[in-house]
Image (cartoon, rainbow, N blue to C red):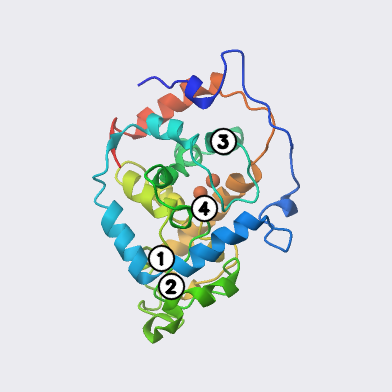
Amino acid sequence: MALSLLSFGVSMGGGMIYGEGKKSEEEFRDYSDSVPLHVKEFYRKNHAFQTVNSVMSKRAEFLPLKRELLSMWEAVERLGTIVDESDPDLHIPRWVHSFQTAEALRKDGHPRWLILVGFIHDLGKMLAYYGEEQWAVVGDTFPVGCAFSEQIVFPELFNANPDINNEGYSTCEGIYSEGCGFDQLMMSWGHDEYLYQVIRNYVPLEAAYVVRFHSFYAAHNKGAYQQFMNEHDKKLLPLVQLFSRYDLYSKDETFVDVEPLVPYYQELVEEFFPDPLQW
Ligand code: FE
Ligand code: FE
C-alpha cells in the first residue's frame, strides 16, 4: 500500500519546520524540578497503576493480537495522531521521530534490521489509538512482581502502588529467580511489549529484543535489575544501549523533509513484514 504523504502533514513542496533546534546531550531526559508538570503527572499515574494485576489484564486484553489487521505503513501514519505525555524532549509529531531515529542509524552505517528498529520502535503507541490511557502506553518500563528499583524515574511515586504492600512482590527477586533472564519478567505494560509481540516472528532476535526493552532505562541506562540478567541479556543489552543513544539524541526539532525518504523505508518495511500484520 502506498504511503500517503498528506497524512504526515507534508506538502508536496517539502517537509515541515519546527522551532527549537538541537539540544545538548545533558538536556535530554531531565527529570529534575524543571520537568514539565504533565510529565510528573503522567508518572504519578503510571507508577500507581502498573501492578501485577493490571499488567496481567492488559496482556490478556491485547496479546491475543485480535484487534485488527493493519499494515506497518498504516501504523506509521497513525503515529501522527498520537501524543506522548511522558516525553519531556519531543514536541513534534511522533512519526518524525521514527524517521529521525532511523536516519541517524542509517547515516552511521548500521545494519538494515537496526535501521528498521529505529523506524518502527514506537509503533506500539498504537495502544493510545485503541483508547488506552497514557500510563499504559508510554514512559519508562520496569518489572512488576518484584521490588521497584530506586533507579526508575520518580521512585517515590511508587508509594501509591498497591503492590508495595504485597510481601511476595516487594523483595529483590519477588516472583522471579536469580538469572532468570529479562524475557521471564512481566514488564510494566506499554508500547515496548505490545510491539514486540506484533513483530517477534518477522525480525531477527536482536531487533525484537531492542524493541522489547528500549524503555527499560533502569536496566540499560542505570544498571539496575542485574540480578535477573542471563548470558543472553549480557550479550544483547549493549545493543539496547547503543540504540538508545539514537532514540534520544536524534530528537531534533528542526526541518525534516521525509518525502525523499519514503521509498527507502517502504522497501525496508516490505523486506521484513507481511501486509497486513495482526495487531
Ligand atoms: Fe519508545
Ligand atoms: Fe522513541
Q: Is residue 253 above or below residue 9?
A: below
Query: Which label was assigned to residue 228?
Result: 2
Q: Earlier in the sequence, mark 1 or mark 2?
A: 1
The residue lying toward the viewer, choosing from 62 and 275, is: 62
- Residue at 55% from the left image edge and 58% from the top image edge: 42
Query: Which label was assigned to residue 239?
Result: 4
| Residue type beneath disc 2 | Phe
Q: Is residue 61 above or below residue 97?
A: below
Q: Earlier in the sequence, mark 1 or mark 4?
A: 1
Query: Which label was assigned to residue 93?
Result: 3
Which quadrant of the rendered structure holds the C terminus? top left
- Between the residue at mark 2 and the residue at mark 4, the CA separation in whole angstroms equals 18 Å
- Residue at 44% from the left image edge and 45% from the top image edge: 125
Q: Earlier in the sequence, mark 2 or mark 4?
A: 2
Is label 4 in a helix, a strand or a loop? helix
Q: Can you tell me whether the CB of the residue at mark 4 lies under 8 Å from the nearest atom of ligand 2?
A: no
Q: Nearer the viewer, mark 4 or mark 3?
A: 3
Q: Is residue 65 above or below residue 99?
A: below
Q: Position of residue 123 (x, y in %)?
A: 43, 42
- Between the residue at mark 1 and the residue at mark 2, the CA separation in whole angstroms equals 6 Å
Q: Earlier in the sequence, mark 2 or mark 3?
A: 3
Crowding at mark 3 (Cα within 10 Å: few <14, some 14-19, many 20+) = some
Instruction: Please name the residue that numbered disc 1 is placed on.
Output: 182
Query: In the rendered structure, are the residues bearing label 1 and label 2 in contact, judged by CB atoms less than 8 Å apart?
Result: yes
Q: Position of residue 246 (x, y in %)?
A: 60, 45
Q: Position of residue 92 (x, y in %)?
A: 61, 37
Is label 1 in a helix, a strand or a loop? helix
Is label 3 in a helix, a strand or a loop? loop
| Residue type beneath disc 3 | Pro
